[in-house]
Amino acid sequence: DVKVTQSSRYLVKRTGEKVFLECVQDMDHENMFWYRQDPGLGLRLIYFSYDVKMKEKGDIPEGYSVSREKKERFSLILESASTNQTSMYLCASRGQGAREQYFGPGTRLTVT
Amino acid sequence: AQRVTQPEKLLSVFKGAPVELKCNYSYSGSPELFWYVQYSRQRLQLLLRHISRESIKGFTADLNKGETSFHLKKPFAQEEDSAMYYCALSGYGQNFVFGPGTRLSVLP
C-alpha cells in the first residue's frame, strides 16, 4: 500500500518566516508533486520533480522553491511566507509510466 | 490548452436520488480522465479512471469524446457519498490538470 506522509497536518507561521513542508513516500516513486488546494480553484500545481535533484515549475511557482535530495523526500519551501500563501498543501507521488497519483494527508498552513 | 471544468460548486441531493456530477475538458489529443474523491478529514484518493471502465462504490463515468465530457453518475445516492469530488485529466507523460471540484451533499 502506497504511503505518502507529510510532516505536519496544521502549521501556523508569521508573515516573513521561512517555512518548510516535508513530504515522504515509501514506494520508490520517481515523480513527486506539490499542489495547493483552495476552494473554488481546485488543485494547482506548484512544483514537481521527476528525479533526485531535478525540479520543474508548475502553474504557480512564484514565492515557492523545492528541494529533492533523496528519492523519497520532496520539500516545499516558502522563502518568506505571506498571508496569500495560507492554504492547504498537498503532496503526491507517482511511479514512472503510471497514471495514478497518490496523495498525502495535506498540511493546512495559516500565515498570520 | 488543457482545462477541466466542473460547473457545479455544490450539489445537494436527497438520499436514494440519482446523482450526476458534471465534468468537461479541453485537450488536443487522447487524455486519460479520472475522478478523485476527498471525504471529510481524509486524503484525496482515486475513485475511478475511464480506462478501467469499472464501477466503484456504485459510481460510473463514461468518457464522451464528442462532447468532451466525463460525467460521474450514481443511480441511488447514499449519505456516505457526501464528499468533495475532483475531475482530472492527464496526457501521456504529462502532469495532471484538476477541475475546481464539486462538493456533493447527500441529505437524509
Image (spheres, coloured by chain):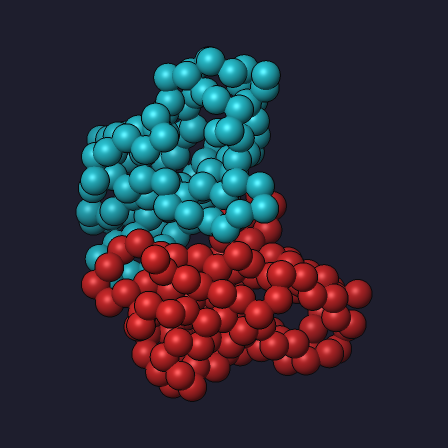
Q: Does B85 sit left or right of A13 as displayed?
A: left
Colour given to chain A in the rendered image: red
Q: Is residue B21 above or below residue B16?
A: below
Q: Residue at x 54, y 73 (%)?
A: A22
The answer to whether residue B15 shows anywhere in this view is: yes
Colour given to chain B in the rendered image: cyan
- Tell me residue B28's x, y (percent): 24, 49
- Tell me residue A94's x, y (percent): 32, 63
Quarter the C terminus of chain A occupies: bottom right
Q: Does B44 sit left or right of B75 as displayed?
A: right
Q: Is residue B10 above or below residue A77?
A: above
- Tell me residue B106's x, y (percent): 55, 23
Q: Residue at x 72, y 62 (%)?
A: A110
Q: Residue at x 43, y 28 (%)?
A: B21
Q: Residue at x 46, y 71 (%)?
A: A24
Residue positioned most to the front: A1
- Tell me residue A54's x, y (percent): 36, 82
